[in-house]
Image (cartoon, rainbow, N blue to C red):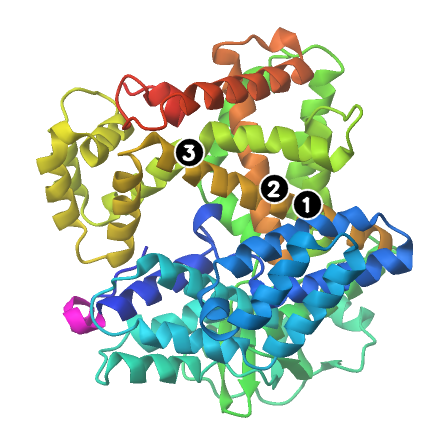
Amino acid sequence: MRVPDKKWAAKPEYQSLLYFCQMLDDMVWDFTRDSHRAPAMNTYHLCMEVQRTWDETQASSLREGLISTILDELHATGSGDPTVIAHFSEPWCKLAFALKFSVAQDIKVGAVARFFHQIEHSYLKRCRDEIQKLISGRPTQKEKMAILTGAFCSYLQNTGYTPRHISRVIYLRFFNRELVSKPVRELQAFFALFSSRPIEFDIYMSVTEQLAAAASDRDFVDYNGRLPLITRDIAAFKSTNEDPKKIVLFHSIRALDEFGAVEQAEAKMALVRAVAYTARADVDLAWHDEAVVTSPTNKRGYLVRARDEQLRKRYRDSASYQFQVVGKAKRAVLEDQLPSPDANRLKNALLSYANAFHSESRATQLVTLWSALEGLLPASNSEGRIDTVVRYSLACQRNLYLRNLFRWSFIEHLAMGREPFFKLLNKASDYTENLSRFVALLCFPKDESLSIELGALVAKSPLTTQRGFALYNASKNVRDLQRVVDAHVQRVGWQLRRIYRERNRIVHRADPSPNVGTLILNLNEYLVTVFEVLFTADVTRPYELGLDRLFEAILLDEEFRSKKAAELLKKPLSAQNSMTVLGFALQ
């Protein structure tokens, strides 16, 4: 959660723009939790996915039922899309009618194709128009802005812009300078930086002699001339190019941004290395993690640091995730508490999970992560395999989701000022555990005066304020908290089925989608959640039950808890019902 240390960020007329910038930046940050990331698909790209999946089912004689969940997601997404509501209302009503009342799938897909034809060339512009309407002054329609920002961010990523580039542009355009123009003008200048036309980049990289010798691609050539004159860090780059390394040039790589171009260059080298390893696995086929990039608009060149390894960076650098996946697993794995073959099943799931971190292929990462998840969960009986995976995964999501929401809000509030934040927490004296104190301070009427002080503490961050207020508001009525959970579970169900389709697309067609990187981050989040729920289950249920019985008990507990929560729908959140509503007791 970044708050720019600039004068403009404190001015009332820029607060909506700040909210947009914070939200967009958070959606592409490597460490952002699944709930706050941009949706994998907006209305525009869901229409494209429907048509692509339909063509694949027809060509492969697959079950047409596979497309039903995408149509459901399209109906839900489009119905709440402010861009669709404001600019494509009539054609959308026709499509919604077809999705709801038509029986034949081909009629529904045909209606989607007609609707897509009407929005194809103007959806992005209209989405930006709607954002501009909300950008001046204080943010008053935050939920609408959140939907629009998610649709815009999703559009950029599905078009081919990398999260790193989007984050970099936000930093350079907003967080690292003082704004001088009106908010709308600043926003328009920002939008203009995202063209739909690819740029040709030249990539200079340092590689070993063996890797250079193994390459035969015409774009992968030795480069013996002078490096482009970049303004800084050139000495560090040159120092890595002493023998036996060489500098190679990837000429005219077409991409939307420099990070995407470097990814393409690294993909070429990874393929060369993979082929070379089939003949000899002990040679040094490596490249340095920095590249000098030039483009028509920057011929002097600039340095791009580190490979875009989101999966490795996000979870290996996080102590909390290391604890969840390693620390809590010791008793189950190392002390052999599980009966065989369940012990082997868990060990193999953990090994598959670890293997995903070592692959350079995103397609392989996704397939490996899916194998870890599918192998860990119980086998299907009468229902389809994907239905079983979804059912048990969603039970784990329900178990942790509200707890995680409060955890994440706790961290965001803490970032606004550690000392004053804990000073406020310590005043919630009914509890000893910090998260419990935060829930009480934020949600309970008894601590309303402290809640007001907490709001004042984070007032400089509109996004932190909004997320805290959303939890405060929902806690007044258990029904609203349940709706938050239900909406999340529905999204995860759609996403799991999308990931399963993507897994099949990779395994059976070797044709991954462009957005496979975002799916990997989502899938990893879901798998870590399953691990965390599993590794804490022995508090009340011994591991001797076996994995299947453990997961069945988790599923039954969540169904029972949902039933009990349904009896409290009109009541506010309280210390007495926190275990039933949130999934954890306040301490």
Q: Amino acid at mark 3?
A: Gln
**Mark 2 to mark 1 CA distance (whole Å):** 6 Å
Q: Quickly name the residue at label 1.
A: 497
Q: Which mark is residue 182?
A: none
Q: Quickly name the residue at label 3.
A: 482
Q: Quadrant of residue 575?
A: top left
Q: Amino acid at mark 1?
A: Arg
Q: Residue at x 58, y 78 (%)?
A: 256
Residue 196 visible in the current orientation: yes
Q: Residue at x 49, y 42 (%)?
A: 488
**Relative to 274, 81 lies left or right:** left
- The crowd level at tag 2 (other Cα within 10 Å; few <14, some 14-19, many 20+) is many
Q: Earlier in the sequence, mark 3 or mark 2?
A: 3
Q: Which residues are magenta?
A: 6-14
**Mark 1 to mark 3 CA distance (whole Å):** 23 Å
Magenta stretch mostly in which secondary structure? helix
Whether the magenta-drawn stretch holds residue 12 is answered as yes
**Relative to 409, 128 lies left or right:** right
- The crowd level at tag 3 (other Cα within 10 Å; few <14, some 14-19, many 20+) is many
